[in-house]
Image (cartoon, rainbow, N blue to C red):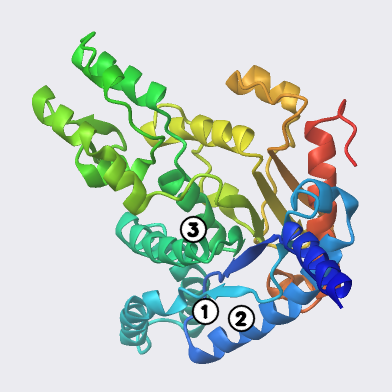
Amino acid sequence: MRIFILLLIFLLNIQSGFASTPVKFIYLNGANANTSKDKMNFINGINNAHIHIKNTLETSNIVKQNMLQGEELYIDKNPVSFFWGYESQADLNNMDDCLISMKMISPRLAQTTRSILSHCMHDAIWVQKTYNMQHIINNLHKCIMNAYANKEKVVLLGHSAGSFITYEYLIHKLPCINPEHLISALESKYKTNDKFFRVNKVKPTCVDAITESGLAIYSTNGDFVAIENIQKIKGIYKNLDKYTDLVCTPQDEFLGVINFGSPLVLFYSDYNNQNIAINKFNKVVYEYLQSNDMFFLTVNFADDPLGFPVSKNYSADEMLKLYNLNFSENGKGFTYNKSDVKSPAPFMTAHTSYWQYPKKFAKLIKDAYEEGLKNFYPRQQIK
């Protein structure tokens, strides 16, 4: 009996040693989804698709060894739905009232075309407005912080205009601004070699912590403008960690992003313009991706009319030339676009067909991850 009890304790200890961390997949809806029926269709669709995505990814040795870090992580069987469609409903109603007012004087074809275009594009335009976007990413942050409180990692999956939100979330919430970035900027701004900033250490922080704290604000042309009073800046700087803890994503909470049916390139075609201050943060986001083994995938069906591929898939060597970022041979962070698989649905419904054909969608994600990792690290033995 004593031997049995000791054996049982030994087995339980072994089992606890292999306890792994769940990964929550958080799905964001796209545009033109504003009703209760739309929400139920979205939730039912992702619940069905997630089963296949989980099973397909977990059959890949490359995914298991890299994304899931061997046996340390596993994909939670329950997906999270982050539905933001209701947020734009009141503004959509206002637009419909304007359309109705023209019904008696506008030709039918023009009115029909106007109605179709406005309903397709309204939410995608609405969510791009800064005040709307900030409200949504703050709500998304609460969802992610809930996962963090439950000791869960997260992956974001944004459909269509939902990809705008995943991109903006990374820009605003990732703690990718390290103290060296910040100190260098402050010393340059105030033309000072004051040791204050180097003596008072702060944690890596995010764009929202800088603006929420009052350290700097956005100007109308997209620049960061810091206040002129250096003594006030010092007081804010000393308390910056409090804002970082409040509004930034905890370090290492993110595994990656999967955007699908994404028109991100169309709506963010100026993202390479380095004259826009916020775009300078693309490089520090890449640095964070590099040092935290994050992935950023774009997967589109080839015949999805709103799925825009990126111009090319860069390798680690090309990223070194473009951004002076050395993705080491031991790294796992990468970005990749895969838009070469045809949807089984007709052309006009391909954009909403991802969860209607979950097996094909799941394989598209798995292949994008495997191909992307090998593309970034061609000299590394990826297993």
Q: Callout 1, which amino acid?
A: Ala
Amino acid type, callout 3:
Ile
Which residue is identified by label 2? 42
Q: State the CA–CA distance, disc 3 to disc 1.
A: 15 Å
Mark 2 and mark 3 lie on one chain; the one further toward the N terminus is 2
Residue 275, numbered circle: none
- 212 is higher (above) or lower (below) than 58: above
Q: Secondary structure at mark 1?
A: loop
Quadrant location, the C terminus: top right
Residue 278's image quarter? top left
User: Which residue bears the numbered disc 3?
Assistant: 165
Task: Please give the name of the residue rendered at 55% of the width and 91% of the height, measured from the top-left corner.
Answer: 37
Residue beneath the point at 38% across and 80% down:
89
Q: Residues within 10 Å of mark 3 (few under 14, many from 20)?
A: many
Q: Is residue 262 left or right of residue 221?
A: right
The kind of residue on which mark 2 rests is: Phe
Q: In the rendered image, is residue 361 in sight? A: no
Q: Secondary structure at mark 3?
A: helix
Rendered position, 287 above or below 69: above
| Location of residue 22 by image quarter | bottom right
Spatial CA distance of label 2 from label 3 is: 17 Å
Callout 1: 10 Å neighbours few (<14), some, many (20+)?
many
Residue 240 point in image, percent of width and height: 27, 38
Q: Quadrant of residue 343?
A: bottom right
Q: Could you tell me how far apart the alpha carbons at marks 2 and 1 are, in whole angstroms?
A: 9 Å
Q: Which residue is mark 1?
A: 33
